[in-house]
Image (spheres, rainbow, N blue to C red):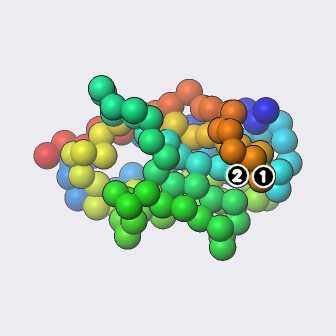
Amino acid sequence: QVQLVESGGGVVQAGGSLRLSCAASGQPSSSFVMGWFRQAPGKERELVASVYTASSKYYAESVKGRWTISRDLVKNAAYLQMNSLKPEDTAVYYCAAKPRGGTDWNSWGQGTQVTVSS
């Protein structure tokens, strides 16, 4: 498994920006995919973005065009730049990892709260 530590959450007004960071350790960066999930109160956890390399990214429709996921393979870290934030983006955000070629997200960070005020 991969050890993951998130940082960068906080409170921001609608239309503002935040950048989340996730530091990974325990496995070579080339061996796993990194992603960001979120869970709002009363809702299921959902995948919002994932990245393996710069040419291999996924975005949920709800964040396309507003957010950018990136990864630094040397630093073994991933980032989520969130622009044009909306109140409905309020949630706990989790960094996660799954083995390259695998389907199970089996490593999770502790989560960081993002609150967007209207």
Q: Residue at x 58, y 55 (%)?
A: 50
Would you call the spot at circle 1 few (<14 residues within 10 Å), some (14-19), or many (20 or more)?
A: some
Q: Quadrant of the N terminus?
A: top right
Residue at 76% over, 59% down: 73
Q: From this viewpoint, which residue is outermost toward the bottom?
A: 55
Q: Considering only vertical position in the picture, is 75 above or below 6?
A: below
The quadrant holding residue 96 is top right
The mark nearer the N terminus, 2 or 1, is: 2
Mark 2–mark 1 distance (CA, rounded to whole Å)? 6 Å
**Mark 2 belongs to which amino acid?**
Val
Residue 113, percent from left and from top: 39, 33
Tag 2 near tag 1, CB within 8 Å? yes
The image shows residue 60, relative to residue 6, as above or below, that is below
Asked whether residue 58 appears in the rendered view, the answer is yes
As drawn, the residue found furthest toward the front would be 103
Residue position for label 1: 100
Of the residues shown, which amino acid type is indicated by label 1? Arg
Q: Position of residue 35 (x, y in %)?
A: 59, 49
Q: Quadrant of residue 11?
A: top left
As drawn, the residue found furthest toward the right would be 28
Secondary structure at numbered mark 1? loop
Q: Nearer the viewer, residue 49 or 4?
A: 49
Residue 39: x and y in percent read: 40, 34
Residue 31, position as x, y percentages in the image:
83, 51
- Taking the spot 75% from the left edge, 47% from the top edge, the residue there is 102
Residue 81 visible in the snapshot: no
Does residue 17 appear to the left or right of 31 in the view shown?
left
Residue tagged 2? 33
Sort mark 2 into few (<14), some (14-19) or many (20+) by Cα contacts within 10 Å: many
Q: Secondary structure at mark 2?
A: strand
